[in-house]
Amino acid sequence: MRMRGWMVRAGVVAAALGLTLGTGAVANAAEREPTGPPQPNILAAGAYALPNPRIMPPGTNDWNCKPSPAHPNPVLLSNGTIANSYDDWAGLSQRLVDAGYCVFSTNIGGSPGAFIQTVGPVAGNASQLAEFGDTVLRATGAKKLDVVGHSQGGMSPRYWIKNLGGADKIGKLIGLSPSNHGTTFFGLLSLVQKFPLARDLVGLPLPSFNDQETNSQFLADLNKGGETVPGIDYTVLQTKYDDVVTPPRSAFLAPAPNVRNVWLQDVCAKDFTDHLGITYDPIAQQLVLNALDPAHARTPDCRFVPPVISSPGN
């Protein structure tokens, strides 16, 4: 199993969980947080963010940015479980800004200023994201925004859409390895659910873990009655080498006219990107740009697939 990157990240989590889990903090539009430089991968971003936990991804949260006619919707970046904003988006954010988008991101689901984020209950995380999204809309004057999310961050906006009025505020939802139907995490997370004490021990510091187990009540409620709504364009980008959302196909949404499910390997067969690497993968990044602006879509260049850190299947 390709769990090397995940285990490295888990080690950082174990060291950092002394931080108290709070309700998270939505950034104040009048107080722009500092931004850091672009990074080549999530491990480098995590190393940079560890002593700078309030750092934001490059180019984000410019509250003076006004969307252009070419890109009228601001882009809101939505973090994955455990990841803070910089971890997930220190590669893609600058590319979006360079393409002419107003780009925003925040930390949710963790103690304000903590390195570990997005571990609170998914419904609460989605509520914080929705609040921040409203701040973005007010500041930019835009009617709608587009959301690009990783893992939990690609799934949780669907709660916003279904329960918090997001259907009228979101134009596009683009998920990179989203946990739309949860994960068994190779059967381990599902096994934990069978033992109430173990489940509660996981859920106390990390409620979002239990919420994302394949058979959780949260996901049953989220997916009941239809997984998508008309009027929003949904794109799911997934890798066959996902080592966190398992089985990988569970990331895909039910077929619908406004849904596009894409395997990265159908675009570039030799792209071995895993779950943690997908937001930094140049092929996935180009597909995000294509989904945001289909009229100017470009074919990803498969010569630029990232190097393989560990062999597929190992």
Image (cartoon, rainbow, N blue to C red):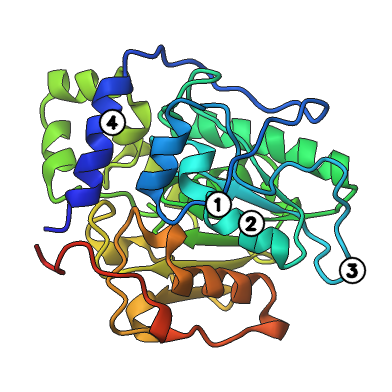
Query: Element under label 4?
Result: helix
Residue 69 image label: 3
Q: Which image quadrant is residue 269 in? A: bottom left
Residue named by callout 4 = 12
- The CA distance from mark 2 to mark 1 is 7 Å
- The CA distance from mark 4 to mark 1 is 21 Å
Which amino acid, by three-letter code, is at mark 4? Val
- The CA distance from mark 4 to mark 2 is 25 Å
Which amino acid, by three-letter code, is at mark 2? Gln
Between label 2 and label 3, give the one nearer the viewer: 2
Crowd class of label 4 (few under 14; some 14 to 19; many from 20; radius 10 Å): some
Residue 194 image label: none
Residue 264 lies, in percent from the top left, at 38, 76
Q: Are marks 2 and 1 in contact (CB under 8 Å)?
A: yes
Query: Element under label 3?
Result: loop
Q: Is residue 172 left or right of residue 112?
A: right
Question: What residue sits 36% from the left and 84% below the top?
Answer: 268
Residue named by callout 2 = 94
